[in-house]
Image: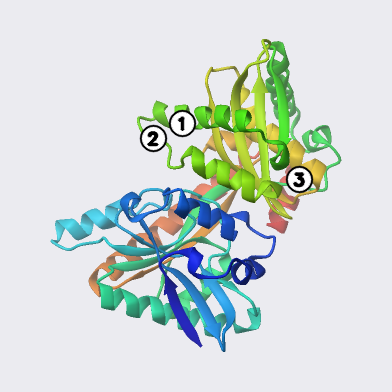
Amino acid sequence: MKIDFLDTIERIDKNDWNKLVRKKYPFLNYEFLKALEITKCVSPEEGWTPLHIVVSEKDIVLAIMPLYMKTDSQGEFIFDWSWADAYYRNGLEYYPKLVSSIPFTPASGPRLVIADESRSEEIIKAVSSALKKISEDNNFSSVHILLAEKEEIDLYSNEDFSLRTSYSFHWFNKEYKNFNNFLEDMTSRQRKNIKKERTKISQQGIKMKKISGHEITEDMLEIFYKFYQVTYLKRGMRGYLNLEFFKKIVNKMPESLLMVLAQNSSGEYVAGALNFYDEEKLYGRYWGCLEEYDSLHFETCYYQGIEFCIKEKLKSFDPGVQGEHKIKRGFCPIETFSAHWIKDVRFKEAIDDFLSRERVHILEYNQDRKSRLPFKKEVTLDLYDKI
């Protein structure tokens, strides 16, 4: 078994990479990761240096993993700023570190994709050893596998990785026939609230459009990009992604894209969202608006996505990180998982203690939020039996 670290995804054949990913999880698509690199959204200057892992045997690719050397913690969404501060207070360097994640994309999914799942334990053991060795040889403080699937994360615990629990809010499709069928599962009060929010959109003279990736025009993309940047400017920062990146993905992977645009009564676009999807899930990713309208964010980012999932028979909808306001609109709190290898044993012990206490808090938080779900009692119980 051979393990290579690649300083660009272009050093592996696209077909060798994508045949492992198949049609699942669009953010691992070769074209998505390549677009990040060639448009310089991901680069050493931006704090992300590619070191992708390819596991092979007799020239056959067995597994792939997106990996980056990081010189800060921007764009990761599993926050470890306090860990870095603790290092600095003790006269030590936390950066550089190694991170396996999808840059700027807090959506759970596979990180190490393995052709033959019966060899998962063997390959994760080999990859973990290689990650530790390259960390020792290059003075990386730590290795972080962020927002991976639970089955993958559990295997890292056998390799001296510490496990971290976080949370997200997802919508689940119970084979609904239409949006009203979904609302029937809700309590009367919340059903009325959502109908009221949706009615406000038409009352304000706004029309909604769903546009497949193949139908996204350059004008649509440019106006959407303006929305995207304005949203970040309101927070006092620039967007992580540039217009060239969006043009690349619309051109290279339109089959994975859904754009939602809102038009005012004058026919002008005033808000939009860009989503990705695969065979099972919709991922809400980027949103922005030029004008504030009552309930427009909920319609653009949540209700239009739910309608799309029902129509396309997708199993679930991940609308992005944070936002307790999602709960009363039918999005359920779920656990998400990461794994962390800390080279310095003293800091590992302290971080393990922190993670243990944090996990208790997260589980209590999730349980409390489950009690606030707007569904009828029997629907809530049935839903959590399946998650």
In the image, what residue type sits under mark 2? Arg
Q: Residue at x 25, y 61 (%)?
A: 94
Give residue 379's mark: 3
In the displayed structure, 46 sits above or below 101; it is: above
In the image, what residue type sits under mark 3? Val
Q: Colour mode?
A: rainbow
Give residue 229's mark: 1
Give the CA distance from mark 3 to mark 2. Answer: 41 Å
Relative placement, left or right, of 306 versus 145 is right
Q: Quadrant of the C terminus?
A: bottom right
Residue 179 percent coordinates (x, y) = 80, 34
Q: Earlier in the sequence, mark 3 or mark 1?
A: 1
Q: Are marks 3 and 2 in contact (CB under 8 Å)?
A: no
Give the CA distance from mark 1 to mark 2. Answer: 6 Å
Give residue 48's mark: none
Outermost residue toward the right in this view: 177
Between marks 3 and 1 in the image, the one whose residue lies nearer the viewer: 1
Between marks 3 and 2 in the image, the one whose residue lies nearer the viewer: 2
Give residue 238's mark: 2
Relative placement, left or right, of 382 versus 98 is right
Q: Residue at x 75, y 43 (%)?
A: 309
In the displayed structure, 105 sits above or below 16; it is: above
Dot 3 crowding, Cα within 10 Å, few <14, some 14–19, many 20+: some
* Badge 2 element: loop
In the image, what residue type sits under mark 1? Gln
Q: Are marks 1 and 2 in contact (CB under 8 Å)?
A: yes
* Badge 3 element: helix
- Residue 29 position by quadrant: bottom right
In-front residue for pair 206/51: 51
Residue 69 percent coordinates (x, y) = 35, 63
Q: Residue at x 49, y 56 (%)?
A: 102
